[in-house]
Image (cartoon, rainbow, N blue to C red):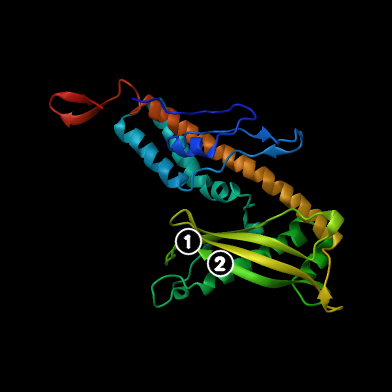
Amino acid sequence: MAERVGGLRERGHCPSRSQLLSSPPFAVRLSSSRATDGSSSSLLPPPPPPSRWITELRTRVGRCISFGCDNQQISRAAAVARAIALEWRDLLAGSEGFLTGGRRGLDRQKIAWGEMDSFGHVNNVNYYRYAESARVNWITNFAVHVDPAHRSEWSELMSPKATGLIMRSLKADFKFPMVYPDNISVYHKLRTKPERDAAPSAFMLDCVVLSHQHRRIAARLEEDIVIYDYKAAKKASMPPFMLDLFAETYRLQVEETARARGRIWDLIAAVERLEKETWDREDAVEDMGSSKGAHKV
């Protein structure tokens, strides 16, 4: 049996696209590596995990258990299964830089039966409403919990009083139709880090809608938001209090990307070890239930 690749951790090494595609599923693991400019403050996060890592890991853990595990292996398999069950939202969203938590978006929002249309799935317009509610919570989190010193200014962004926010464009990419019953979690992230030297008059937010039933991203939204001075009736530069908090938020997004991806690749490596110890051994045998005992695989 050909030996599988695993645990590639050479600092500064990055596999080529052909290596990634030719390797077995989940075979490549990279630790954070320094940027090409040698900067000690700029670290490259691990590569993105495979898109269906949740489903694949659950299936692979099940195969190891059905093949046969000792008590210690069962304990490790259960730990992986428990981590997927409890952490999947944080890891799935975090691996793309989304900061999770109820104050930062929508957590475990129930889909209403009436949100479905005559085609038997959640009507597309509801996704825009989910994103809107999550975006308001995202802004409110800054006002109430992160930067209370500028609470009034953050709150005014959601009103046409002084400096406010106007949606310039809103696009959605639907991945699959959700149906009742289901719960959703919705999160936002800054697409780019705002630069203080050239305070922007607009910024981009990415949004994901997660289906709890399927443990997948059901929709992605792209929001182009303009900073508007209602008193002067024209676009305005991003206020300093926003610049500071957005810069810090972007830094946290980068850190969360590295943390979540590292955790996912650790789970993948744990499953690979289980496979090597069970059905993927050279001497692996499985009891097929025959009267003559075990058959080699």
List the residue tagged with mark 1: 175
Tell me: 295 left or right of 201: left
List the residue tagged with mark 2: 172
Q: Residue at position x 53%, y 45% from top? A: 87
Check residue 21 in the rendering and tell me which mark sits there, or answer none.
Answer: none
Callout 1 amino acid: Lys
Vertical order, 194 against 173 (above or below): above
Crowding near the residue tagged with mark 1, few <14, some 14–19, many ≥20 C-alpha atoms within 10 Å? few
The image shows residue 280 at horizontal and vertical percentages of 35, 27
Taking depth in this image into account, of 29 and 35 the one nearest to the observer is 35
Which quarter of the rendering shows the C terminus?
A: top left
Marks 1 and 2, how far apart at CA: 10 Å
In the rendered image, is residue 245 in sight?
Answer: yes
Callout 2 amino acid: Ala
The image shows residue 163 at horizontal and vertical percentages of 82, 71
Q: Residue at position x 48%, y 29% from top? A: 6
Q: Residue at position x 37%, y 42% from top? A: 59
Which quarter of the rendering shows the N terminus?
A: top left
Q: Secondary structure at mark 1?
A: loop
